[in-house]
Image (cartoon, rainbow, N blue to C red):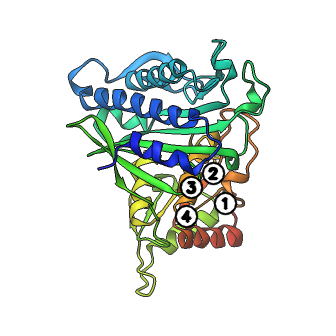
């Protein structure tokens, strides 16, 4: 049995000039995830369900557990002294750590502390998404430019899924590996080495309740998924949890496609490029899958705002390419 800490130490030899800072950040993220997991597992027994009186930057009511997770990840990374700042989906602005030592750090971290938070109160799988970049600003206080980098510049990305078991899946752009939390010893242990996504799959994930608001290309692709065809194994099964981490995790293991396209009311999509789409795109591509906006690779987008949104089609290569063919033929955007 190989623990996450042991695995991280072993992998440091893949980076001959590594200082160990990146490894340390990953360990601190895993520590915060353990604390959040503890609260998730007893959420129904303590006063941590429900909403706070606050709204986040997106105008959404903040869940108590969302707020708790956000504070845990911020403090864990602040105390580590290994990153010079963070950006969280829950906060309007990035947070530059002011300690003199942390201002000499070479990395910044972005994260969505609790993805799928609308599922918290009904005991459905939720998750944490994180991404690590090497800073581009001079040493000292980090700047907005450190966070507004293309997804292709990520040095590491991962997610934690709090489900029937708790898993941490991450990549340092050298393959993808998954670790399951063993509650008996309180350690993440390697359970899914060198994850490879099937080239195709039998599931598609989309909020089909918005069907009338999708572009024609999306609607036609969904019809394609529903049609019977023995050679391609259609119809595909519709699976939609409403938590990007949970839906992408399932498709990563079994094969499939997750879609959150532009709609009539959200021409730029709903999911956040920096906090959700970029990290998940890197994860899936490291496993052999694809992630596109409908017209280009997600990882090629240049962010201009911390909370920028974008459409996403992510999953098994053949299914994403199939969706792209429909989008190019009929159009990805909604038209009356």
> Residue under circle 2?
311
Name which of mark 2 and mark 1 comes first in the sequence. 1
What count of labels does the image hold?
4
Residue contact between numbered discs 2 and 1, judged by CB atoms under 8 Å: yes
Residue contact between numbered discs 2 and 4, judged by CB atoms under 8 Å: no
Name which of mark 2 and mark 4 comes first in the sequence. 4
> Residue under circle 4?
289
Is residue 151 depicted above or below 78 in this figure?
below
Q: Nearer the viewer, residue 301 or 32?
A: 32
Find the distance from the CA under tag 3 to the CA under tag 1. 26 Å
Dot 3: element: loop
Q: Quadrant of the C terminus?
A: bottom right
Other-residue count near label 1 (Cα within 10 Å), few / some / many at <14 / 14–19 / ≥20: many
Which residue is most to the right? 138
Task: Give the image location of residue 205, x and y in percent.
Answer: 45, 58
Find the distance from the CA under tag 3 to the CA under tag 4. 14 Å
Dot 1: element: loop
Task: Give the image location of residue 326, x and y in percent.
Answer: 63, 71
> Residue under circle 1?
294
> Residue under circle 3?
174
Is residue 330 depicted above or below 66 in this figure?
below
Is 108 displayed left or right of 162 in the figure? right
């Amino acid at each position: 049995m190989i623990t996450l800490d042991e695995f991280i130490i072993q992998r440091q030899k893949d980076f001959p000039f590594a200082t160990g800072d990146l490894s340390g950040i990953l360990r601190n993220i895993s520590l915060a995830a353990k604390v959040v997991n503890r609260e998730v597992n007893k959420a129904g027994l303590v006063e941590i369900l429900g909403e706070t009186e606050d709204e986040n930057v997106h105008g959404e009511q903040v869940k108590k557990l969302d707020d708790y997770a956000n504070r845990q990840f911020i403090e864990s990374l602040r105390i580590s002294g290994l990153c010079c700042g963070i950006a969280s989906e829950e906060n309007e602005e990035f947070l530059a750590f002011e300690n003199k030592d942390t201002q000499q750090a070479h990395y910044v971290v972005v994260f969505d502390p609790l993805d799928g938070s609308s599922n918290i109160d009904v005991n459905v799988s939720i998750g944490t998404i994180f991404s690590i970049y090497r800073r581009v600003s001079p040493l000292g206080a980090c700047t907005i430019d450190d966070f507004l980098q293309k997804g292709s510049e990520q040095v590491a990305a991962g997610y934690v899924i709090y489900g029937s078991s708790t898993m941490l899946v991450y990549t340092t752009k050298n393959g993808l590996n998954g670790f399951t939390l063993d509650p008996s010893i309180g350690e993440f242990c390697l359970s899914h080495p060198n994850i490879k996504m099937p080239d195709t799959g039998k599931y598609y994930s989309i909020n089909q309740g918005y069907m009338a608001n999708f572009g024609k290309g999306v609607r036609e692709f969904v019809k394609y998924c529903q049609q019977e065809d023995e050679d391609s194994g259609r119809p595909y099964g519709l699976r939609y949890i409403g938590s990007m981490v949970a839906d992408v995790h399932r498709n990563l293991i079994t094969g499939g496609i997750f879609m959150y396209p532009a709609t009539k009311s959200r021409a730029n999509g709903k999911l956040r490029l920096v906090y959700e789409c970029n990290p998940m795109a890197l994860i899936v591509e490291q496993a052999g899958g694809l992630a596109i906006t409908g017209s280009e690779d997600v990882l090629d987008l240049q962010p201009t705002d911390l909370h920028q949104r974008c459409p996403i089609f992510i999953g098994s290569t053949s299914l994403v390419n199939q969706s792209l063919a429909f989008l190019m033929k009929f159009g990805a955007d909604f038209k009356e």
